[in-house]
Every structure is written in structure tokens, then in C-alpha cells.
Amino acid sequence: LLSQLDKNIIRKLQDELPLIPEPYKAIAEDLGITEGVLLERVKELQKEGILRRLGAILHHRKAGYDANAMVVWVVPDEKILNAGEIMSSFTQVSHCYQRVASPGWPYNMFIMVHAKTKQECEEIVCKIADATQVYEYEFLYSTDEKKKSSMKYFMED
Amino acid sequence: MDKLDMELLNFLQNSFPVESRPFITLGNQLGITEEEVIGRIGVLKENGYIRRIGGIFNSAKLGYFSTLCAMKVPENRMMEVVEVINRYNSVTHNYVRNHTINLWFTLIVSSEEKMKAILEDIKFKTKIDEILNLRAVKVFKVKTVFNMVEV
């Protein structure tokens, strides 16, 4: 279970790291602890996999990835593990999730593909289809980004 | 945006130092001063390349879970429906997509009850009865680092 201190640290780190020479010192002062304690806790959170990554989060369109497709697949149960592993092995695939299918929604595998152009996205997906031998899929391109934010934990609705 | 900026962005994403003077270490890796690192990051933020510098957490390990939701929204009601949905902190992503089921959002919540309550609330406020709730069964991959490519 997380201590109150860890929760306070998480609340700070999910915000913006101050762009000053000693950012951790500033955070530690806010929390009323020493910089040393903070650095130790942050490393511990990283080691435990609670803090998955610390660093810059980019606007990926700005990073040169203009075509970002969600591709949904109907994968038979017995093929799920294999297909999931193959899809994940593509560097252009950032997310790969098996999800529950639903009445009116037969797709049970979801991937996000990022490339410079739509054509490149489609070529990658063709390769994935051949590699997994799964051919029932659909592209859903985003036409408008309405919200994109990082989750704020321990600050409930 | 020059080659040094690209390298800086790659370093910043992959290995932000957990030590007292992180920008000195980054500077040493790039052969520039702490001051220049901070200056360049400031410009990259201003120009919209960097959304945030901070932590990304594993929601499952914090006792949260996420789900992908989707609904069919008539084009002329899109704005008001988006406004209702975006108001929740638990909604982290919300996209219009080219499909008859056209609005897709993710929800990160700390309990089953909370998830149900938010979805019921959205149905009530939007008068749209059907929301697909596509819970994850298995996570195969989550990658949030983008190597900078030549543009």
C-alpha cells in the first residue's frame, strides 16, 4: 500500500517538473522533506514499476508522426496470445490491448499505429495482418482530438 | 529545431536523471551547459514539442483501472456531448473518429462503482443511452516514448 508521502510525491510528479537547475529540491521543499529523501523515494517508485517513466511527454504530431490510427481486429480466442505478441513487436505500434467484445462490436484487439503518413500506417497494418493471419480489421483515424491529458491520480472527480 | 534539439528530446524522454542537478547530466551527454539545456527545453515547450515533463504512472499499480468507451453521437450534438464528457478528470483522452461509432474516450477510475456512476451520469446528461464499455482483458504493450524522426 502507498504511504501518504508517496501519494504526495505522485501528486507532484504528475504535474510539471519545474524547469530550474534543482527541480527536485523545489519539490522536496514543497513537501517538507529533504531532497535526498525525495530522490530515494522516486528511485524506489521507479524500481517498483509504479512510476513507469519520468521525463518528457511529446506532442507526437509535432515529433513527425502525422498519421495516428487505431486499428481494431477480430482475433479468434485461440490466436489471441500469438497475435498480441506479434502486433506488439512492431515498433510503430505504441499500444496493444485485448478488450472485451460487445454486442454490435465484435472487435477484441486494439492497437495504435503511428507513422508519418496514412499510407505508411496502412502498409504496416498489411504486414501485421500477414504476420498474424488475421484479416478482419478496421481503421479508425482520429479526425479531431477533443482531450488529451495525463491522468491526475488521487484527485477524484 | 536542430539536431541537438532532437537528441535532447530523445534523452529527455528516455532517461531523465533522478539526481540533484539533472540538467547538468543531460548537458554533459550533449556537450552543452546546464543553462543551455534549460533554455532549449523552454523553447521546445513554447513551440509545442513538449507537452509535459513529469511522471507517467502505472495505473494498475496505483489501484486504478482504465477502460475505453465509445458512443454514437449525432454530428449536430458533438460539441455539447464532448463538453459533458471532458468535464470529468477521469476522462484522459477523447477523440472523434471516422466511424459510425464516432466518439472514443478513455476513463481511468479507482473502482467499478465509480466507473458505473460516471457512465450513468454521462448517459443521463447526454440522453444517449448506449455507451460501449470496452474493458481491457490483457495489456500486451504500452509505449509512450517516440523517437524523434527527421521531418
Image (tube, grey):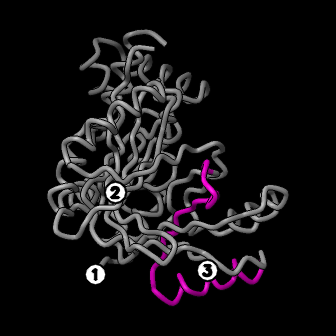
Label placed on residue B119: 3
What segment carries the magenta color?
B97-125
Q: Mark 3 lies on which chain?
A: B
**Front position among marks 3 and 2:** 3
The quarter of the picture where residue B20 lies is top left
Q: Is residue B79 left or right of residue A15?
A: right
Magenta-drawn stretch contains B114: yes
Kindly identify which numbered label has been placed on residue A1.
1
Q: Which of B143 and B1 is in front in this view?
A: B143
What separation in Å lies between label 1 and label 3 (alpha carbons)?
Answer: 28 Å
Q: Distance between the residues labelled 1 and 2?
A: 22 Å
- Which of these two is toward me, B103 or B94? B103
Q: Position of residue B121 (x, y in %)?
A: 69, 83
In percent of width and height, residue A96 lies at: 31, 54
- Asked if labels 2 and 3 touch by Cβ distance under 8 angstroms, the answer is no
Residue at the farthest right position: B76
Q: In percent of the image, x 26 and y 41: which residue is there? A: A128
Residue sitting at x 26%, y 27%: B25
The amino acid type of the residue labelled 1 equals Leu
Type of the residue with mark 3: Leu
Residue B21 appears in the picture as rendered: no
Q: What residue type is labelled 2?
A: Thr
Eyeballing the image, is A51 above or below A100?
A: above
Residue A131 visible in the shown view: yes
